[in-house]
Structures are given as structure tokens and as C-alpha cells.
Image (cartoon, rainbow, N blue to C red):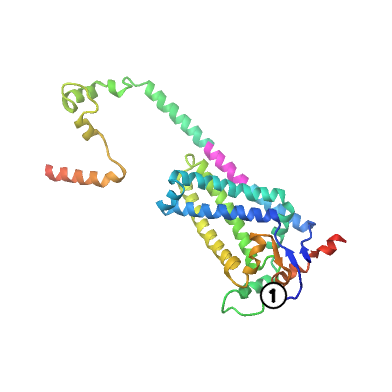
Amino acid sequence: MNTFQEKTNLTRRQFLRGSGVLAATAILGGILAKFGFNVQARSQEYIAQRANGLYSLDERMTLRKSHENPEILQIYKEFLSPGGVTPLSEKAHHLLHTKYGDEIPELIAELKQHSHQAA
Amino acid sequence: MSQVKGKVLKHAGQTRLMHWIHLICFVILGITGLGFYFKIITIDYIFGGIGNASVVHRWLGVVFTVGPLLYILTNFGRFSRFIDTISTFTKDDFKWLKTMGGYIPGLKGEVPPQDKYNAGQKLLGWLVIICCFLFFVTGFPMWLWRHAMPPQLLGLCYDIHFWDAVIAILAVAGHFFLAAIHPKSRVEFASMMTNGYVEAAVSAHHNEKWFATLQNDSELKA
């Protein structure tokens, strides 16, 4: 069978055009990658500084644990779980737990019902 | 049609392999990507849930990037000849675009001789290069730097990635129609999808300028 195929030599023009596209892509990609790495480095630096700030603020607080806060303990003893401190009491569950996602329309309906009843 | 007998090796084995890898990746990336964007949960279920579909999308994105890169580095001559061909636009290419190569009914006129790739394929070549570049420069930040990027920039990446995909899918759909379905052009289907060969008479007719530069095996043996 008579078969034909391309010449495999590479002319100077072909070489320059191929190299040019490859180089342009690499340079443009490199610049964008450098920008991305810089953004990430700045972001990490900000997160570290913010975390340090929060920890140092926390260390200066008199009360550092919510379950040891006397006002919270009093609210539980007198209202949320009378007679003791029960964080998962039914009243605490209803009043302190929020709803999210698909439950939001149900929450809005419930709040509207409460406001009608209060009126 | 030319009466020349024989066959032309249009696409070498590694080119066909790269084309197959890119094709399979593109189809799966397109399907999973559309599933994410339009929240088509059925598509996610095909891949075992949205988490798995996301993993498939990201890692096929890596193959989609590394595949052509390896091809370029190991076939620099072929890549350079390809770039040289698609970046050469002559009067014949503009004339071809005026008649759209005779593929569109209603656009009549003489179809001028073409290179290895006709003017439409040259434009598609550039479109694919630009689209792939945009996929890379928006896709990887959306994966690796999503927690570090400003939300506006991340949103811009999502928008560019999506519209880039829309353009690429439409372009590839047109490419598929002409390569596999249109009776005038599907004669070259096997040259990229199976053995790499196309009838010499077809090549002499569709790619007259390129065919004139080929050497046959008797010249090679001499």
C-alpha cells in the first residue's frame, strides 16, 4: 500500500512558534500562580495573627469558661433547669438551640405564631 | 476528488492517545461540572454522591492538565508543527471562512485549498488552547486556595470556569458533529479515533496544501 506521511524535520519558524506559545503559557501561568501563592501566604499570615490576638484577649479575661460563669449557672438554676444545672434540659433545648437550612421556614412560622399569641 | 491512491498517516499514535485521554476527561469533567452547577443530584449519584463526584472532577482535572503537558514535552516537534499550522492564516483561510468550507447549507462558493487543518479547525485549536488555559488558572485556585482567596475573586473564578465550560462544550459539540456525523467530513473520523490513517484521495482534496508537502514511503526508503 502506498502510504504518505509528514516530514519530521522542524523548521526554525515552527520551533519559534511552538516555543513561543509554550513560553507565553508558562510565564502567564507562573505569574498567576505566584499571585495565588502570595494571596495564600498573606491569608495564612492573617489567620495566624488573628488567632494570636484572640488567644491573647482570652488570656486576659477573668472568666474564661462559660460553664463556670456564675451568671450562666444562675440562669440555669432559676429558669432553664430549676433546682440544678442541666444544660440539656427541655427548656434550654427549645430556647438556646437554633435552626438552620431547610428548618428555617419552620422556625419563621413558629416565631410568627408566638408573636400572634403575644399580641 | 483526487484520484491518488494510498493512505496518509494524519495523526500519530501519541497524538491519538492524548486526544482520547483529553476526550474522556472532558466528557466526565463536563458531566460532573454541569451536575455541580445546576445541582443535578442524579449526576452526583452516578459517581457515588456529590463528594465522590467532586473528587473525580478535581483529579480528572489534573489528568486533563498533565496529559497535554506530557504530550507537548515528549512530542515537541509535533506540537510546534501544530502551533505553526493553526497560527498561519492566509487569504485561503479567510475565503474558507466565508464559505465555511461548504459545510453550511446556503453558503456557496469555491472552497480554497487548505493546510493540514482547515480554517475552522485552526480557530477551534486556538479556542481549545485558550479554554484549557482558563480551566487550569481558575480550576486549581478554586480547589487549592478557596479558603485563602477573597470571596469576590473566588466568585469570579467560578463564573469564568462556568462560562468557559459552556463555550468549550458548544465548540466540542460542533467539532463532534463535523468529525463524526457530517457526511462530508466524517471520512476522516478514523484518522484520530482509530488507526491514524485517512484515504490519500480524501486528504488531497480536503488538505491540498498539506498533502503537497508529504512524502510517500518510497521516498522515505530511498
Span shown in magenta: A29-40
| A83 with respect to A103 (left or right) | left
Is A23 situated above or below B166?
above
Task: Between residue B146 and residue A42, name the one nearer to us.
Answer: B146
Q: Main secondary structure of the magenta part?
A: helix
Task: Between residue B82 and residue B6, name the one nearer to us.
Answer: B6
Task: Between residue B199 and residue A77, name the one nearer to us.
Answer: B199
Residue reaching furthest to the right = B222
Is B200 situated above or below A89?
below
* Residue at x-position 62% and y-position 75%: B102
Q: Position of residue B3 (x, y in %)?
A: 75, 76
Q: Residues within 10 Å of mark 1 (few under 14, many from 20)?
A: some
Report if residue A12 lies within the magenta region.
no
**Quadrant of the image containing the C terminus of chain B:** bottom right
Q: Position of residue B84 (x, y in %)?
A: 72, 60
Pinpoint the chain carrying mark 1.
B
**Quadrant of the image containing the N terminus of chain B:** bottom right
Count of picture labels:
1
Q: Which residue is mark 1?
A: B112
